Image (cartoon, rainbow, N blue to C red):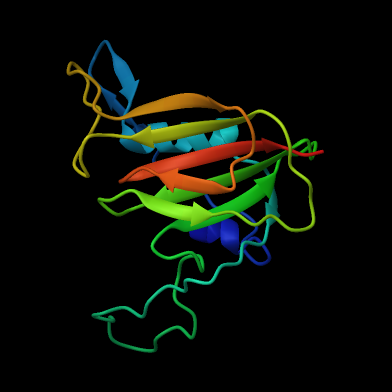
Amino acid sequence: MQEMFRHTDFIKMSAFTFATSTLDYNGTDAIFNTTGLMFKLYREHYGTLPIEVTGDSPQPSPKWPVGGDQPAVNAGSPTYPLDVVAAFTSDRKFLTLAVVNPTTSTERLDLKIDGVRLQGKSRLWQMTGPSVDAADVLGHKPEVETVETSLPEVPTTLRVAPISINIYEFPVQ
């Protein structure tokens, strides 16, 4: 999904066409499954006006490229192993930063924000579970949760939890 956000200069619209696949349901009950929770997280907290993200850690070339022509640029942000996208909210009062950590270790990301001044109490919504196989299944205790955390100020360094999706909201001055 973040790759689509990165290319809004030519991707104008996309759709997840089978909405019931975001649910776990039976004849009487329904809950969001992990995919549904992810869509809900981005819809409720990620901005709508994209901002370019740069970095000094490019994505590595694929180890086992599939046949045919290979792209000149590998998918993902230049913040390997993390994947980072950014956007302003529609009113430009907040800068949102979505950071995905697909690794099994905590990763560090030093922030350098140019062109805008951020200051004040910030927020983080973090979606994660105990393992890469964690899932929310109807009738069982949820394994994947989204937790909101208040941050006293805009951090200069992020410590990003393993196997997580994180959306930060920073106030624009």
Q: Between 124 and 156, which is closer to the camera in this rendering?
A: 156
**Residue at the extreme bottom:** 69
Q: Percent x, y for residue 47? A: 65, 41
Residue 1 visible in the snapshot: no
Q: Nearer the viewer, residue 66 or 52?
A: 52
Give the position of the C terminus as an image quadrant: top right
Identify whether 80 is placed above or below 155: below
Number of on-image labels: 0
Q: Measuring 79% from the left and 50% from the top, which residue is drawn there?
A: 116
Residue 7 in the figure: left or right of residue 133: right
Picture residue at 74% right of the left edge, 58% below the top:
114
Q: Is residue 105 rendered to the left or right of residue 120?
A: left
- Percent across and percent down for residue 149 are 50, 25
* Position in image of residue 132 (x %, y %): 22, 44
Asked if residue 29 lies left or right of residue 85, the reply is left
Q: Quadrant of residue 67?
A: bottom left
Q: Can residue 50 be seen from the camera position used here?
A: yes
Q: Is residue 52 above or below residue 46?
A: below
User: Residue at point 20% right, 18% down?
Assistant: 141
Q: Is residue 58 above or below residue 5?
A: below
Q: Residue furthest top?
A: 28
Query: Which image quadrant for residue 138?
Result: top left
Query: Can you give x and y, in whole percent of width and height, for residue 34 in the image?
Result: 32, 35
Apparent side of residue 37 relative to residue 47 in the rendered image (left or right): left
